Image (cartoon, helix red, strand yellow):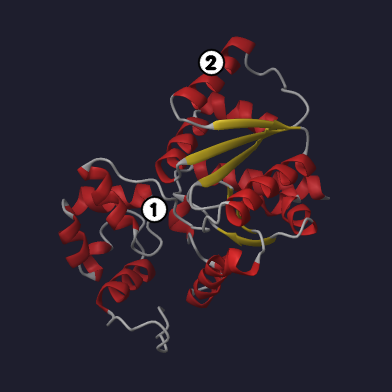
Amino acid sequence: MEGENAEEGLEEKNEAEKSGEDIEDAGAGTLEGEDAGGQADLLEFINAGSAEGKVRIIMDDRERGSGIRQKLEARGAEVRQVVLNAGDFILSDRIAVERKTRTDFENSIIDGRLFEQASRLGAQFAKPILVVEGESFEGRINRNALLGAIASLMLDHNLQIFFTLDSERTAELLFAFAKREQLAEKRPLRLRGDKRASTMAQQQQLIVEGLPNVGPQFARALLEKFGTVEKVMKANEKQLMKVKRMGQGKARLIRKILTEPWKKEGEPDRPTS
């Protein structure tokens, strides 16, 4: 049964990627499909972390059928599922992990998805990791092409690549990394990584990414539409909705975040939707 669920989750994730659906637009940061209340719960989960001496891991909701969540929790980790715009597991402010079965690894090399995912992961996290899970490759691509892809991922995209036999070993690896980062290194857990922008365009994009449910691709679309960060921030609800896949709910939430009066820490907050 676990295998069937994992396959369904993988197909769902792949279809979203192939269709061009930006995962960030599907509600990044929303706890297991919940609304603004779920977001508050997620932020509380993120901020509690190492103060309680517990390992906490954020997992992409499309990994729910892999069985890894249960294996992580059996080791003592607390896990929350969200829809992520990059990676399958976030372990700290600098480490995010993309997990592939060996079959999907081959498929994503063939259709080019893997390199797009690697770019997105590397753009947001300083230490991106790829875990390839399974006993053997199916041989759909020849050895030279496979080695070339691995070399490109490591040298061009700065990914560290680990190979595991099964989901048990994958969970073991994830827990070890998260434990070291959070408990030994005292690094925080973040939905967005700590990678610093180096160019003006990157700095502008990062500012726009700070808006609710806006990730790299959507931030670029907003900047292409309006031209400057200032114009993005001043755009009204109707203007925002002219950007492709910008629904009324998201546009309204962005305007609410930008215009709602700021309150000091500890004061009762108003709901964001």
Please name the residue shown 56% across and 38% down the image. 129
Q: In the rendered view, does 191 fall on the left or right side of 75?
A: left
Tell me what residue is drawn at x 25 percent, y 77 percent.
259
Callout 2: SS: helix
Q: Residue at x 78, y 55 (%)?
A: 75
Residue type highlighted by circle 2: Gly
Residue pointed to by mark 1: 215
Q: Which residue is mark 2?
A: 148
Please state, as top left, top right, bottom left or bottom right, where the C terminus lies in the image: bottom left
- Is 207 placed above or below 177 here? below
Corner quadrant of residue 81: bottom right
Three-letter amino acid code at disc 1? Gly
Mark 1 packing: few (<14 Cα in 10 Å), some, or many (20+)? many
Q: Of helix, strand and loop, which one carries label 1? A: loop
Q: Residue at the far front: name it.
A: 184
Relative placement, left or right, of 238 versus 5 is: left
Please name whichever residue, 201 or 34, is drawn nearer the observer in this view of the structure: 201
Dividing the picture into quadrants, the one containing residue 201 is top left
Q: CA distance from mark 1 to mark 2?
A: 29 Å
Sequence-wise, the earlier of marks 1 and 2 is 2
136 to 255, vertically: above or below:
above
Image coordinates of residue 240 in percent, x first then y, are 25, 63
Outermost residue on the bottom side: it is 268
Whether the residues at callouts 1 and 2 have beta carbons within 8 Å, the answer is no
Q: Residues within 10 Å of mark 2 (few under 14, many from 20)?
A: few
Residue 271 image position (x, y, % from top left): 42, 83
Residue 18 in view: no
Judge whether 81 appears above or below 136 on screen.
below
Residue at x 65%, y 52% (from the top left corner): 179
Circle on res. 273: none
